[in-house]
Image (spheres, rainbow, N blue to C red):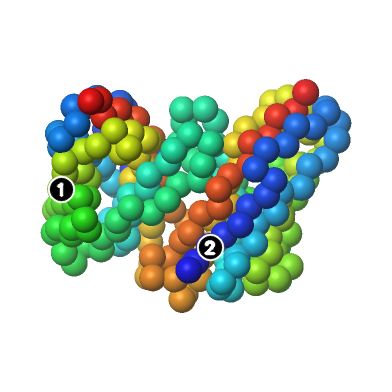
Amino acid sequence: GAVVSQHPSRVICKSGTSVKIECRSLDFQATTMFWYRQFPKQSLMLMATSNEGSKATYEQGVEKDKFLINHASLTLSTLTVTSAHPEDSSFYICSASSPLLVYGYTFGSGTRLTVV
Amino acid sequence: QQQVKQSPQSLIVQKGGIPIINCAYENTAFDYFPWYQQFPGKGPALLIAIRPDVSEKKEGRFTISFNKSAKQFSLHIMDSQPGDSATYFCAASKGATGTASKLTFGTGTRLQVTL
């Protein structure tokens, strides 16, 4: 149980276009969703936290107009990278939280974004 | 500010050895300490987690030791196997399980288990 499905797993897009990444909790209701960014050989960096039906809370230094987060339902959250540039290329990972999860958090499998 | 310090950055052990990864935290409000394993191109997967009311927890070949007074915790992998080669992250958060508290991650340890 407690599976989070994240897709796409890989995406390549052209500079200036937008890319949407989806995370779905398959067998539980995700009251909170966290979005992380990870550079090669580095740790996970929290970008934003979102609660279902509320606006996301962004970490300092993260552009909210560039990284649009939507958490419209308890089973779906999306991250849209708008007007992508090569420096946005990274590994993006979502994590869902629910009071019903024994260990609190479960992670998606990640999305490798390459902007060319 | 790095609130969870992890060491070593990388570690090489022979098969059957016991790699030990250490983490230290600063925020005494942290009360949940999980360890995650991450393979290249994949999301982190929970290995084991501990709360400060116990000093040790064992699940299979993985053991967490926790020292509340020193604000340190460590991961031991017994009888390590080549399949354990991955990056390991410690983390910490405040609040009870399943709350909206964010995880603070350590910097990661790249473990290689050789034959």
Whole-percent x, y for residue B1 in the image = 42, 38
Which label sits in the foreground, 1 or 2?
Answer: 2
Q: Residue at x 15, y 48 (%)?
A: B70
**Disc 1 and disc 2: Cα gap in Å?**
35 Å
- Rendered image: mark on residue A3: 2
Residue designated by label 1: B70
Quarter residue A27 falls in? bottom right
Q: Is residue A49 visible?
A: no
Q: Residue furthest right?
A: A16
Q: Are marks 1 and 2 on the same chain?
A: no
Q: Residue at x 26, y 60 (%)?
A: B50
Mark 1 residue crowding within 10 angstroms, few (<14) / some (14–19) / many (20+): few
Q: Is residue A29 visible?
A: yes
Q: Chain of mark 2?
A: A
Amino acid at dot 2:
Val
Q: Secondary structure at mark 1?
A: loop
Q: Is residue A25 left or right of residue B54?
A: right
Relative to A58, say whether A97 is above or below. below
Q: Secondary structure at mark 2?
A: loop
Whole-percent x, y for residue B65 in the image = 16, 51
